[in-house]
Image (tube, helix red, strand yellow):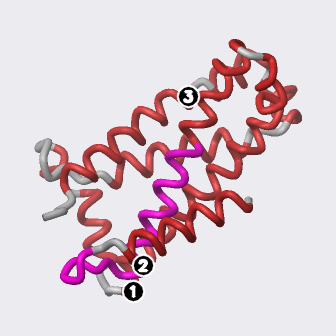
């Protein structure tokens, strides 16, 4: 939790400090970016723990704590999503948010495609995984079903990679 707080604080302060004067991002924009990038890095690390534990036994303690780290990553991702919705609410543009998601024309183009449904779909998968991460659900769902559900992390990660990549391609950094 301390590392997450340190990352988010450092991201916001450094991004603001190194921004060009004419492109100074607002704190609410930085908050969205900081939580989103933190969640992305956390999920990337979670996916690396399994192979690392197989390569070197020193990483085995991380394998045990991977579920806890995954729940924390879900919480950070959920806060990222909440801050996006909050951004629209503060600007009185919530109908624009729903319009972006529901307008079929936004799904027929590559550049300019809305990235929000990709993030929402990934967040729903992460929610199901976080909600069933306790051993109780492993027994209730049976190991094969539980494992199949938690293997959906790869689909969610693919959605997140597309969410991030398309978001970066559409952002104006000039």
Residue at coordinates 84% horizontally, 30% vertically from top-left?
61
- Residue 152 - label: 3
- Residue 156 - label: none
What residue is disc 1 on?
90
Residue at coordinates 47% horizontally, 57% vertically from top-left?
36
Classify mark 2: helix, strand or loop. helix
Distance (Cα) linking label 1 and label 3 = 34 Å
- Residue 28 - label: 2
Residues tagged 1 and 2 counted as in contact (Cβ below 8 A): yes
Instruction: Identify whether 86 is placed above or below 123.
Output: below
Residue at coordinates 87% horizontally, 33% vertically from top-left?
135
| x and y percentages locating residue 62 in the rendered image | 78, 32
In front of the other: 4 or 77 = 4
Q: Which residues are magenta?
A: 20-42
Distance (Cα) linking label 1 and label 2 = 10 Å
Magenta segment main secondary structure = helix
Circle count: 3
Residue at coordinates 22% horizontally, 77% vertically from top-left?
23
């Amino acid at each position: 939790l301390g590392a997450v707080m340190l990352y988010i604080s450092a991201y916001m302060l450094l991004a603001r400090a190194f921004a060009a004067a004419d492109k100074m991002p607002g704190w609410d924009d930085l908050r969205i970016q900081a939580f989103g990038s933190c969640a992305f890095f956390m999920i990337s690390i979670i996916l690396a723990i399994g192979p690392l534990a197989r390569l070197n036994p020193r990483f085995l303690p991380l394998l045990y704590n991977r579920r806890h780290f995954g729940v924390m990553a879900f919480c950070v991702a959920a806060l990222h999503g909440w801050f996006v919705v909050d951004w629209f609410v503060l600007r009185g543009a919530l109908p624009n948010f729903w319009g972006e998601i529901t307008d079929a024309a936004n799904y027929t183009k590559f550049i300019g495609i809305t990235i929000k449904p990709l993030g929402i779909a990934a967040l729903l998968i992460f929610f199901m995984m976080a909600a069933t991460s306790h051993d109780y659900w492993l027994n209730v769902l049976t190991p094969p079903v539980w494992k199949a559900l938690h293997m959906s992390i790869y689909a969610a990660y693919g959605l997140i990679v597309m969410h991030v990549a398309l978001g970066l391609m559409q952002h104006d950094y000039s």
